[in-house]
Every structure is written in C-alpha cells, then in structure tokens.
Amino acid sequence: MSARGPRGASSGGGRLFPLLTGLVAVLVPCLVAGIAATLWWESLLSIREFGLHFWRTSVWDPVAGQFGAFPFIWGTLYSSFLALLLSTPIALGIAIFLSDLSPHRLRQPLIFLTELLAAIPSIVYGLWGIFVLVPLVRSLESATPAWLRGTPFFAGPPLGVGLLAASLVLAVMMIPYTASVAREILKAVPSTQREGAYALGATRWEAIRMALFYGRTGIIGAIMLGLGRALGETMAVTMLIGNNPKASLSLFAPQYTMAAVIANEFTEAADELYLNALVEIGLVLFLITVLINALSRLLIWRVGSERRARAPRPVPATAG
Amino acid sequence: MLTTLRSVLVVLAAAAVAVFLAPAASAEPVQVDGAGATFPYPIYSKWFSEYNKLHPDVRINYQSIGSGGGIRQLTNQTVFFGATDGPMTAEQLQAAPGRVLHFPTVLGAVVPVYNLEGVDAELKFSGPVLADIFLGKITKWNDPALAKDNPGVTFPAGEITVVHRADGSGTSYIFCDYLSKVSPEWKTKVGVATSVNWPAGIGGKGNEGVAGLVKQSPGSIGYVELIYALQNKIAYGSVRSFDGEFVRASIDSVSAAAAAAAKQMPPDFRVSITNAPGPNVYPIASFTWLLLYEKPRDKQRSRMMVDFMNWAIHDGQKFAGELGYAPLPGAVVTLEEAALKKIKAE
C-alpha cells in the first residue's frame, strides 16, 4: 500500500482515492445496465404481445392496441444517416481549414463560432427550422422538376416539413461535434508527418490527405459522435419531420422518429400496453445506438489494426 | 491533501444538511399536489394562485403532464388530485384503489382552423365533410362537398394539407369524439383517444405546433383550442350543429352545449357533450374534469380541496372567459355542489 501514495499508508487517502475513483468508474456501467434492465422490464407486456413483429410491422394504432415500430426505426435511421451524409464533408472541411489552412488571426474566432453551434438549445433549432428552413425547403420542393418528383425519392406534395427539413437541421446540429473533434485529431497528428510529406515533395493537398489518413480512426470517431447526436435528437426533429408514422423513401414525405414518438405520446399514454410499447421503442432506440456504437468501435479497431500491421515500414522513417 | 479533502467533505455535508432542513423549517402552508391535463392548465394555474391569495395556508401545486399521466399518478396515489380532458374509462376507474369522482371545472372548444389564400369568407364545415377531410378522402379544396356547405365561395384547386396533433392530447380526444359521432367510418377506422392512428396529414407538437404549421402551410387545415385560434389570429370555421345550423365557437355557444347536457347529466359527470342538440350549440365542446377520491386518507387536504372546488365552481368561473374557456352553466354548478358533499372529508 505504502508504495502507492506519496505519503504512505499512514494517510487513509492512499486507500480511499483508488476506491473512490474505482467506485465512480463502476457506477456508469451499472447505470447503463440499469437503464437497459428497466427498459426491458417496463416493456415486457409489449415484448410478449408482439415479439419480433414489433420491429417489422408498421401499424401504430393506440385505439386498437396495435403497435409496430418500423416507421419510427426507419425514420430515425434515414434522417440520421442523411444528416451524416450532409454534415460530414462540411465538418471535415471546417476541421481541415482550421487546422491547416486558416490564417492565424481568423482561427480562434472561427473555432469559437463553430463550437457556439453546439451551445444552441435544440428547441431554438426547431423554431429556426419552422420559420426559416421549412419555407425554404417548401419552395425548393415546389421548384423540383416533375421528372424528379416522379422518382420515389422526391415523391409527394411540397409540404416543407418532412424528412429533408429534419435532416438539414440535424446536419447543422452535428457539424460542431464532428468538426471540433476532427480538428483536435488533425492537430494531434505529429508535425513530423506533415514535414516528412513536404520533404518528399508532397503538395499541400497531399500533405493534408496524409494527415487525414494518419488520423482516420479518430476522424471516424468524430463522425460517430455526430451520428450519436442525431439518433437521439428529439425536439428539433419532432418540430420539423411532420410526425407521420409511414416509412417512405421520399425526402419530401413527413416521417417520424423513435425519440419523437416517445416524447409526443408518453404523457398521455394511460393504457398499459400502449405505455409498454412506447418504452419498447426506447429499448429499440437504446439497442440501435449500442449497435451503431459497437460497429463504429469495430471499424476503428479494424482500421487501427490495419495500421499496426503496416506500421513497421513508415514508422522508422518519421519517428526519429 | 487529505485535510483539504476532509474539510471539503465537512463543508459539503453542512451544505446538504442546510438544504434539507431549510424548507422544513419554513414550510407553514400545506401543499396539495395534483397532476394531469395540459388543456386547462392556464386557468388552473390562475385559480391556484388566486386561491392562494385568499387562503395563504394552502398551496396547490399542479403539474400539467397530460391527462394520461394525471390518471396514472392519481391511481398510484403519488398526487392528491388528478385532472383529465377525457373521462376515465370504466377500466381505469376499476384500477384505482378507491372510488374516483369526476368534477367538471370549465369547458373548452376545439375549432377547425385553416389557411386558404384567396378565400376571405368564413368557411362552414358539416361534420361528415370534416371527417372525410381528416380521413384523407377529401383531398382537394374544390371538392363538391365543401362547395355545397359554402355556397358563394370560390375554392382554389389546391391540395388540402391536414395538420393534426402529434402529441397525445385532450384536444385530439374531443375532436375525435366529435368526428366519431358524425362519421361511422371515423368511428370504426380511427376511433376516439388522446392519440389515434391518423389516416392523413402531418403532426404538429402542441396547440402552438398545429397553429404554427397551419399558419405557415398554404392550403392547410387543422384543429386547435379556441383560445389558440384567437391568440394567433388564424381563420377558423363554423361547424354544423346537431340541429343543422352552422355555429361559430364562442363562450356563449360552448356554454350552451353544456347547458343542453345538464338536463341529462349522469350522476358521475362522465359525459360527452360533442354534437349536443339545441339551438346555437357549438358541437365540438367538452368539459374538463378534476379528479378526486371519494374517501381519501388525508382528511386535511381533502377538506382543502373541497373548499377550493366550491370556490372554483362559483367565484373562480369569472376567470374563464378571459382565458378562452366557457364557464359552467348554473345547472351543472348546482349538481356539483351536491356531489362535493359526497366527499368524506371528516
């Protein structure tokens, strides 16, 4: 014991501190397990009643007691991945500009402003979406040529609210998370890497590409952080997505997400089965989030091990 | 290091003790907790603060978590009283540990709001047409059925965008209750509840969400509580009553609906007054109820709530109008006075 603390075993702090930190470290996994167990327990009625059909069926009828979560799962994944697609190039662009290209005087204000986006409450995003974005999206939808409107991706009347509006706001909300983590990653790439690239005659673009490649595990992590934000976002999405539980390929169609339906219907759900079905949606959302996180871990791990396998060749050249 | 840690702990402990002790020492007024419907929240919070001015010893704390949540918490006895926009079902009454009584407090109305450019006239809706629009069967504004109800109005050819509540709400309950009475198809296909499987349209969150979407979307139709249509200055239509006249929602036409219902009021006050018969009766109206146990364990709080209710159904009614609710008709107040005596407060 005395070897651990600088003041030896005589002070109780040497024992207390690891115990305390260990306790809080265990607390969080316990909390996660507790949440999972509660969700499972509170949705047992619905799990027994619908089984796996819950994931596949599309009817959500509180009056008839029929519950299927597919439109909500679909809407959550569709809106989040579309937002991911929209936000990633912009966020990476911001990160690259701020880490490699920006004039020194511009850097701090730009960093501050980007991170400010993360501080805006989601209800404010929702209001901005309703008053600014939705009319814009509506006129964009009205201006869409008929041959495009004929395809399943742009079908339906120009409502303004719908999947596209929700995904656009989600993309804006994701940008600060992805951008600031990606910027930190690029900053953490050793300068010897860039210098080495320049020494070999690389252009600026090639040096940046090299830095991106070097930090790719971290950058995937940054993108996943943004995705996590999108999957769970509730308020801004429910104000813009149209809240219509019908799965559709169309970007113009009003759809629904899991987080939104829980927030909307939980307070008035008096019937036991109805309540259980809503909790089961929470369970499904929880499982999907865990699954996506696990997949991203796997991706990072694979990319990382690939790097370790390749490492012996480039490292001696730059490690010096 | 350790001494600092210890002193920090001591300070924290002292602070925690102070926080826990402080309210206990100064808490003189008795707090009565309630939870439930959001629809009557504006008038309830007005009542509770006015009543507190008259009776500083009573503080009524109301959480507007929704009718479903209110019924649930009342059943679990985590609150002393509940509030709901749709009467409790027989099943829910059965699940409660004691007999629950319903007390109507005020009345509200739900109005069809629309946004139709180029039409200045106030639109008229008959029940089946309204039901067909919300069923997604009437999809264009220039549908002959709409033209028939509105002679002289030239409708544009645009699509109708239906806007409904996305969140569970008493407003939806009242609206669906009305549509079920005027459309057999609505009754079998959709039904009545605080949330239903909407056959058409987009969902807005809250009255303000629906009002906002309707205001923004050209060619849209939705439904909100009367007060929201008035506050947001959205055009709202009149609705054909049971007697066949088109009636515009107002404090008078809503109270008339309640007066008509008072004649055949069931003893437990669980009554739907949508599509009520009589002249100048607005058909999409409803009571909102406060829920109390007949034999509560806590006699002190029970006495307080009975006294409050007696105040609310008399003096409290004068606040209804300015907040967009219709006051209870005299006949209902008399019935409630008798019902309040049933509560065993001694």
Image (tube, coloured by chain):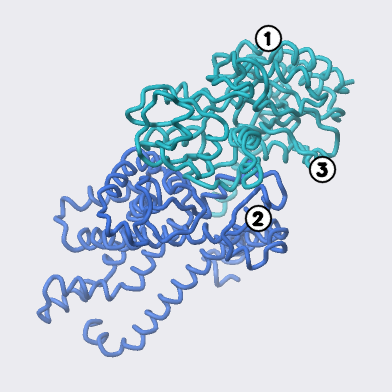
Chain colours: A blue, B cyan
Would you say residue B244 is visible in this rendering?
Answer: yes
Task: Give the residue drawn at x 38%, y 36%.
Answer: B219
Residue A167: % across, % down = 37, 54
Residue B315 is labelled as: 1
> Disc 2 designates what residue?
A66
User: SS for tag 1?
Assistant: helix
Mark 1 chain:
B
Q: In the visual, does A287 lie left or right of B156?
A: right
CA separation in Å, label 2 and label 1: 45 Å
> Where is residue A36, by image quadrant?
bottom right
> Disc 3 designates what residue?
B95
Observer-side mark, 2 or 3, equals: 2
- Give the residue type at disc 2: Gln
Q: In the visual, does B184 lie left or right of A246?
A: right
Whether marks 2 and 1 lie on the same chain? no
Q: In the visual, does B35 lie left or right of B324?
A: right
